[in-house]
Image (cartoon, helix red, strand yellow):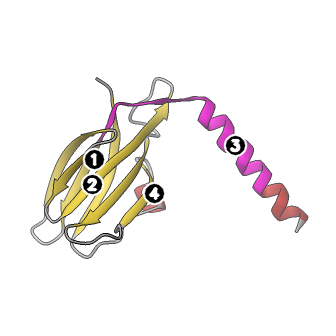
């Protein structure tokens, strides 16, 4: 139990340090894949806005990146809903360099973060 508590405190401290050294983008560049026809599409979405991709709606709530490196370790908070469904298909942080860490699970579409954008 003590080891678990120490690990959690270490992770929390690391997250606080990472949070201090990030910048916030004005939006995110995403890539959407329609698995049915194999088409990949780049989508630029401003924070707080949504875009439609096929039968899903993607909302970018926030995009952050390390100081001076918009593409390297960018991470965005996304909400993805299927048209006509209130419950999100995906809601959470997605990391550009490791999209499989917290992937969206949808039978037809795949979405991942490429980088943050700035005006």
Checking the image for residue 14, the label placed there is 3
Sequence-wise, which precedes: disc 4 or disc 1?
A: 1
Which residue does the image show at 43% across and 47% down from the upper left? Answer: 97
Checking the image for residue 30, the label placed there is 1
Sequence-wise, which precedes: disc 3 or disc 2?
A: 3
Mark 4 to mark 3 CA distance (whole Å) = 19 Å
Residue marked by disc 4:
92
Q: Position of residue 104 (x, y in %)?
A: 36, 65
Q: Position of residue 106 (x, y in %)?
A: 29, 72
Disc 2, disc 4: CB below 8 Å?
A: no
Discs 4/3, front: 4
The span picked out in magenta is: 8-28
27 is within the stretch colored magenta: yes
35 is within the stretch colored magenta: no
Which residue does the image show at 13% across and 72% down from the upper left? Answer: 36
Checking the image for residue 58, the label placed there is 2
At numbered mark 3, what does the secondary structure look like: helix, strand or loop? helix
Mark 3 to mark 2 CA distance (whole Å) = 29 Å
Mark 1 to mark 3 CA distance (whole Å) = 26 Å
């Amino acid at each position: 139990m003590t080891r678990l508590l120490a690990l959690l405190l270490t992770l929390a401290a690391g997250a606080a340090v990472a949070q201090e050294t990030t910048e916030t983008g004005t939006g995110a560049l995403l890539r959407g894949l329609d698995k049915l026809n194999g088409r990949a599409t780049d989508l630029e979405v401003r924070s707080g806005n949504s875009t439609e991709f096929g039968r899903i709606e993607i909302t970018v709530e926030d995009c952050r990146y390390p100081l001076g490196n918009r593409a390297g370790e960018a991470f965005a908070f996304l909400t993805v809903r299927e048209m006509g469904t209130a419950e999100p298909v995906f809601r959470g942080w997605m990391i550009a360099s490791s999209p499989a860490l917290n992937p969206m699970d949808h039978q037809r579409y795949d979405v991942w973060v490429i980088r943050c954008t700035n005006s």
